[in-house]
Amino acid sequence: IYLKSCWSPCFWHANVRDGSIAVGIYSIGISICLITYTIYVLNGGDTSQLWLPFFETDMKSGTLQGSGGVTICYFMVLILLSILLLVGVRKEIRGLMLPWLYTSNVAILFQIMYGLWMVFGYYIYLEMVFAALCNWTWMGLNIYCIWVVKSHLRNVERKQSPDIEYYNDV
């Protein structure tokens, strides 16, 4: 899929370069929000609702600390890679954009699995199906963000690819 502009409910940009910058800022913002939520949960916050991500974790057994630590570590790495994405977009360095793409695909995979877990694990509760649909809608926005960055990466690749011509004197 090749996009020429970036449109979403949150932002609109006439080209994918500006859209990629917006995606990097969005990634930093959402990572900060999710790190804050994880710290709140680790300090005794509410996880009693079925649709909350740390619902089946427990402070006593250590599963909350382990999963919370992995979550915080992942989003810290995503913040770093989002900053590299912003630098890569501004300076047109493809190698700085690729790590963000791979890391974002990990988030997409998690959202798929989490939604399936909600549907198949708690299908008797209708609100869980709604929560899974909300999760997959958010996942759709994240997939679109990946498409925007991939489209910009393709533009940079075409712009930077050398035209090598061979001259034969024969």
Image (cartoon, rainbow, N blue to C red):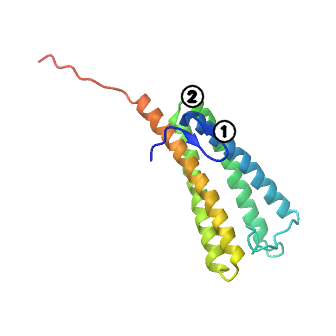
Q: Quadrant of the C terminus?
A: top left
Task: Evaluate if marks 1 and 2 touch, with contact meaning CB atoms under 8 Å apart.
Answer: no
Q: Is residue 157 above or below residue 170?
A: below
Q: Residue at x 60, y 72 (%)?
A: 116
Question: Which quarter of the picture shows residue 140?
Answer: bottom right
Label 1: element kind: helix
Residue 29 or residue 18, whichever sits in front? 18
In the rendered view, does 103 fall on the left or right side of 166? right
Query: Badge 2: how crowded within 10 Å, few (<14), some, or many (20+)?
Result: few
- What's the residue type where badge 2 is placed? Lys
Quick one: which residue is furthest to the top in this view?
169
Residue 28, position in %: x, y?
Answer: 70, 44
Label 2: element kind: helix
Residue 11 or residue 155, whichever sits in front? 11
Disc 1: which residue: 83
Q: Residue at x 67, y 80 (%)?
A: 122
Query: Badge 1: how crowded within 10 Å, few (<14), some, or many (20+)?
Result: many
Disc 2: which residue: 91
Residue 121, position in %: x, y?
Answer: 65, 79
Residue 76, position in %: x, y?
Answer: 71, 49
Residue 90, position in %: x, y?
Answer: 59, 29
